[in-house]
Each structure stands twice: as structure tokens, then as C-alpha cells.
Image: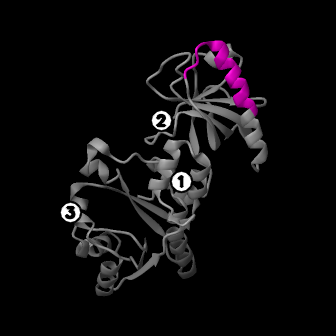
Amino acid sequence: MFDGVHLGHRAVIDMAVQSARRDGGIAAVLTFWPHPSALFRPENATKLIIDTETKVRLLSAAGVDAVIVQPFTREIASIEAELFLPHLQKFLPKLHTVYVGENWRFGQGRRGDINLLLAEARKHGLVVMSSARVNENGEPISSTRIRAYLEAGEIAKANTLLGYTYFAEGSVEAGKSLGRKLGFPTLNLAWEPELRPRFGVYAVRVSGPKSKHLHDAVANYGLRPTVEQSTRPRLEVHLLGDCPFGNGDAIKVEWLGFLRPEKKFENVEQLQAQIAEDLMAGAEILSKKEA
């Protein structure tokens, strides 16, 4: 799945890219969409950290020459492990080497492992290279860990495993000017990820084509229970300095620190006082981060 394109994924990808550069070959990534769980347990499918478009961009930035997005269907799921490599060769006749993580499983019922892959590769004239799992604090880096951190609001830990700063991208859309009425105007971002980070207030930095500079800001992601109990989460961003962005502008919001969970205040005055404290706390966190 390469969900998140985290440091564990990068270990496998970097091996393939370096080999392709050395041998004059092409480094390609095969990835699935949707997550297999959407087929086998649709009532409780795994929520993805990033969408396919973002995944392709991150893979390309990692040096990959081609990305193959394979729809995960019952036909794909039913391929026997021993037939997996011939299936790849049918569509990729110049396939030379397959790079995988040491714990990778494949084939119907996830029956295939690295030992079976090695044995089958010899039969079909292919080379297999496996990458050891990358650990952080003694535990393997995985998309599952990152999802848990994001849902808990532990954004700094998620960023460590991702190897880059978690971000949201989209176009600024017109809101109800509620932030402006409170004295804290916000940019409202049209952004709806599958995996929702914890509702709350975050220290962030904002950039976009209109201004590549990283602008310090504080963002609220959630349902805004004090001013309007919405059913659709919204990302609202207040810049700590001059704001060069407006409605329709594309922006990127990088999440650096969690300040507090979202809560409902008794009145608007309490909310205003808390926002003022949030801005000071956000500025303090951002002052300690490298720009």
C-alpha cells in the first residue's frame, strides 16, 4: 500500500531507485487502491493516511520513475502466491528485480512470504532484494503506528516516523467569517482525509504557490462546537503574521505540534480568551522549530 510513504517504505524504495540508477533501469512502484480491507471487511475498512494522488507525488519525489496503481479486486486477491511473479512478468516483460520489505506477504490468503518469493524468483529468472524493517525506539515503523499517532494527536511522533512533516493541501474556501467576528480571521481549507487526525488545535506552518515562505500559524481541525455544531470537520488556519492568501488560493498546511483537544466553551468570550492563549502557545512551539 505504501500508505504515508514513511521511512520504512523509503528503505525499500531507495534500494530500488539506487539500483536502477546504477544499472540504467527504471524504478517502478506497484501499489494498490483501495486498501484490501475495503474488499474483505468494508464495514471496518482501514482509513488511509494519504490519498492516491498525494502518494504518487511523494513516490515521484523519492526518485521513482513510474507508479503503477493496481485496483485491488477479488481477481487480484485470488492470485495464488506461486503465480504472482508470472503475473507481474506478463505485464512487465522486462522485469529484472523485485524489492520488498522482509515481512511482506502476498498471494491468496497472504500465504506467500519472502522465502517463497525467493524460491519462485529463481524459477522465473528474477532477482529478489529484501529490506530489513526500520525501527524507531525499538518498534518497527509502520503505517498502523502512524495512524494511531495521528488519531491521538501525537503529531510530532507521526512526523518522526513519516520522515517529513504531515500536511494538508487544498484550496481556501469562503467560510462564515466566524473567526473574523471573534477577532481571529482564518483561512478555511477544503480538506477531507480518510483518516481524520484528532480534533483539536495545532501549531502549523502555511505555504503556497502565492508565497513559498513558511508562515507560522495556529489551526483548528474539528466541528467548531462553540459557534456551530457542524457534522463536517473543517481545517481553519489563523496566520500569526500578515496573510498573503485568500479565497481560491492553493495552500499547504504543515502540522508541527498539538496544542489541545477541541472542546465546547460556555460562551464566545471564553473561546476568545482560549484562542489568545492558543496563539501564544503555538508561537512558542514554532519558535523552537527550524523553519
Residue 21, by quadrant, is bottom right
Mark 3 or mark 1, which has the lower sequence index? 1
Within the magenta stretch, is there residue 269? yes
Mark 1 or mark 2, which has the lower sequence index? 1
* Real-space Cα separation, disc 1 to disc 2, in angstroms: 18 Å
Q: Which residue is mark 3?
A: 78
* SS type, badge 2: loop
Q: Is residue 224 left or right of residue 203?
A: left
Q: Up-down: is 159 above or below 139?
A: above
- The residue type indicated by label 1 comes to Arg
Q: Is residue 172 left or right of residue 33?
A: right
| Residue 20: image location, x then y, percent | 52, 76
Q: Which residue is mark 2?
A: 192
Q: Up-down: is 33 above or below 82?
A: above
Residue 172, by quadrant, is top right
Mark 2 or mark 3, which has the lower sequence index? 3
Q: Which residue is mark 1?
A: 57
Q: Residue sitting at 28 percent across and 73 percent down?
A: 112
Residue numbers of the magenta segment? 264-280
Name the dominant secondary structure of the magenta segment.
helix
* Real-space Cα separation, disc 3 to disc 1, in angstroms: 29 Å
Q: Residue sitting at 59 percent across and 44 percent down?
A: 167
